[in-house]
């Protein structure tokens, strides 16, 4: 049986003031009137039955996620008591799936990207599942051919091809400087690391037992309770705060002996900051990105303007800014400072506590 696990636990501080602890970025309706999480689930139509799709999210988001995804069984919305990064989110998903079906194929997806066209994505995922089942001891990752030297992403170093879109992985590189990133792009042997995977549950559990054994040991009571059809919230709450916070790349992928990469020949867009909306939203004649019902823009260029309600936003003679309105806070900043919004949120928390974060 094939299962999908969607990781949806991030908070998205760089999308403040709409993204908050109580309402993370994957639930914001800022792309085509849909949330990123809804888009992530819809992309899986025809690949996985709704009963076979799990969402791993923060426990404080679980009810909101369940409300946004009524097509999924409520028990498939799994709340992490505390964030412990991707290795443990995947380990938790693997243990829950092992309780259902030890021979399952497990695909892992993110909830903060726009991937299109969707038919290309579906074909690639199906091919990846086939490859994982043909190579039951391997871990498969999805790589995206880079079209410029991005320094904020990890890279996958590929070796020989096993087939047209299946490669052996030689290694991983984390967020290189510009010189190295340009060299990687020019070589043709490096791909952006998408953070999405496919493998047999038995394969990832074997690797986790070897490289992250404490997490597997501490999550074992969760698996046993799930296998018995019991409520596993208590053992999960007991185990999770004790787990080492670590990414799946550091914990497993960089150490595993058999790693393959599937070439994801799709447009893959990370919506991690307000300027990223330029890649998915239509611009007006002055290169402004506007996601707001009520706005007037005069002699203003290259701005990002966002509001979810009927609040009027009016710009006059303003260039290269980000203006985002929420019900209790408004952000105005230079586009060049978009990556520093996380620092602003930290400052807000020191000044006002958790009220605005």
Image (cartoon, rainbow, N blue to C red):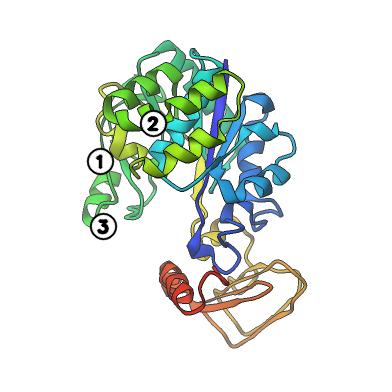
Q: Residues within 10 Å of mark 2 (few under 14, many from 20)?
A: some
Q: Give the CA separation, mark 2 to mark 3.
A: 40 Å
Disc 2 is placed on an element classified as: helix
Relative to 232, say whether 273 is above or below. Answer: below
Quadrant containing the C terminus in the rendered view: bottom right
Residue where numbered disc 2 is placed? 218
Q: Nearer the viewer, residue 198 or 343?
A: 343
Q: Tag 3 or tag 2, which sits nearer the N-term?
A: 3
On screen, 329 above or below 136? below
> Whole-Å distance between the Cαs marked 3 and 1?
14 Å
Is residue 215 shown left or right of residue 66? left
Mark 3 surroundings: few (<14), some (14-19) or many (≥20) residues within 10 A: few
Residue 45 percent across, percent down from the top left: 67, 30
Residue drawn at the location 57% of the way across and 69% of the way down: 17
Question: In this picture, is 152 found above or below 62?
Answer: below
Instruction: Residue 187: give its label.
Output: 1
In the rendered view, does 267 fall on the left or right side of 174? right
Along the line of sight, which residue is nearer the eye, 131 or 222? Answer: 222
Residue at the spot x=32%, y=38% of the render?
249
Mark 3: secondary structure:
helix
Q: Nearer the viewer, mark 2 or mark 3?
A: 2
Residue 78: x and y, percent?
58, 37
Q: Dots 2 and 3: beta carbons under 8 Å?
A: no
User: Residue 178: which numbered mark, if any?
Assistant: 3
Q: Specify which label sits upstream in the sequence, 1 or 2.
A: 1
Q: CA distance from mark 1 to mark 2?
A: 43 Å
């Amino acid at each position: 049986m094939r299962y999908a696990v969607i990781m949806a636990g991030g908070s998205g501080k760089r999308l403040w003031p709409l993204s908050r602890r109580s309402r993370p970025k994957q639930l914001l309706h800022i792309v085509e009137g849909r949330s990123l999480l809804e888009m992530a689930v819809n992309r899986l139509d025809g690949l996985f039955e709704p009963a076979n799709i799990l969402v791993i999210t923060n426990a404080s988001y679980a009810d909101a996620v369940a409300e946004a995804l009524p097509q999924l069984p409520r028990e498939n919305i799994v709340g992490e008591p505390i964030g412990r990064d991707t290795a443990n989110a995947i380990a938790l998903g693997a243990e829950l799936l092992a309780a259902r079906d030890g021979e399952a194929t497990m695909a892992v997806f993110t909830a903060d990207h726009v991937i299109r066209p969707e038919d290309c994505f579906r074909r690639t995922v199906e091919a990846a599942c086939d490859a994982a089942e043909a190579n039951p001891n391997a871990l498969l990752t999805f790589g995206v051919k880079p079209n410029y030297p991005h320094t904020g992403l990890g890279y996958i170093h590929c070796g020989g091809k096993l087939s047209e879109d299946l490669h052996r992985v030689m290694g991983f590189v984390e967020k290189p400087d510009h010189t190295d990133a340009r060299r990687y792009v020019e070589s043709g042997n490096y791909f952006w690391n998408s953070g999405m995977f496919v493998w047999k549950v038995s394969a990832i559990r074997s690797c986790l037992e070897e490289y992250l054994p404490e997490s597997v040991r501490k999550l074992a009571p969760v698996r046993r309770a799930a296998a018995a059809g019991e409520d596993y919230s208590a053992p999960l709450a007991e185990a999770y705060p004790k787990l080492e916070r670590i990414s799946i790349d550091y914990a497993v992928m960089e150490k595993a002996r058999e790693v393959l990469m599937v070439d994801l020949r799709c447009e893959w867009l990370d919506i991690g900051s307000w300027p990223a909306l330029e890649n998915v939203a239509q611009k007006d004649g002055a290169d402004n990105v506007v996601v707001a019902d009520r706005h007037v823009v005069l002699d203003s260029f290259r701005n990002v303007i966002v509001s979810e309600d009927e609040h009027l936003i009016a710009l006059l003679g303003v260039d290269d800014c980000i203006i985002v309105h929420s019900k209790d806070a408004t952000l105005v900043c230079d586009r060049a400072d978009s990556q520093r919004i996380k620092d602003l949120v930290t400052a807000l928390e020191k000044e006002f506590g958790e009220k605005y974060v």
